Amino acid sequence: MKLVVGLGNPGQEYMFTRHNMGWAVIDHIASNHSLGSPVSKFRGEFWRDRDCLLLKPETFMNLSGLAVREAFDFYKMESADVLIICDEMALPYGQLRLRAGGSAGGHNGLASVISCLGATDVSRLRIGIGKSPSQAAIHQNTVNWVLGHLSKDEMEAFPDIIDKAAEGVDAWLNLDIDRAMSKVNRSVKKPSPPLSS
């Protein structure tokens, strides 16, 4: 049994915000697999597709671990059987990074999961949202950035990013972790420098 968790915040006002990338991926997977409406379970929205469980915690981001722990205990899982999907400011917009474990890297939702499970070997698929262009009032600026709605340009790229993230989940489910990371962890292509004449 595998548990795939998309982190985000409940409420219409948080739809298409940078902090809700994890939720968007879960919705995309559930729709693509025709899983229908979720059930209300484990403090969130929950789907089961054979041996794959999908969960969108509705505890708000900073308490995400409470929902994950309930599903984890109910199915008697190992921490390595859990994948957390979340946003990541340290990555350029749209870049994906799959890891088998590690620290929370300053992400409060991921920190809650690690704390509640008491383990760092929880796989995580980070989706880059980039850093705020403004450097003033660092903490408040960070909050405003992650809770801000995607720009027009970001929205144009959004469907392709969510598609690729869903493919990353599929890789995690079906490949060993090293092969999955190799497949997923491709950098955003930068423009080639002009050739000198």
Image: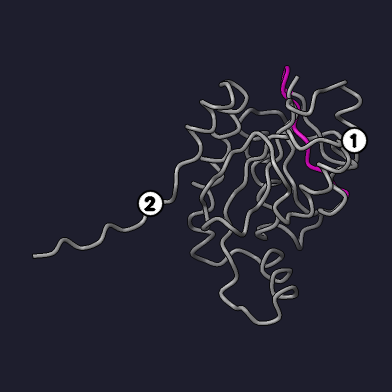
Q: Amino acid at mark 2?
A: Lys
Q: Is residue 134 magenta?
A: no
Magenta segment, which residues?
49-59
Q: Residue at x 70, y 57 (%)?
A: 19
Q: Amino acid at mark 1?
A: Phe
Q: Residue at x 54, y 33 (%)?
A: 181
Front one among 36 and 194: 194
Magenta stretch prevailing secondary structure: strand
Q: Quadrant of residue 5?
A: top right
Residue identifier under label 1: 42
Q: Is residue 50 magenta?
A: yes
Q: Quadrant of residue 134?
A: bottom right
Q: Quadrant of the N terminus?
A: top right
**What's the colour scheme?**
one colour
- Coordinates of residue 80 in the picture (x, y in percent): 73, 27
Q: Is residue 144 above or below residue 170?
A: below
- Coordinates of residue 197 in the picture (x, y in percent): 8, 65
Residue identifier under label 2: 189
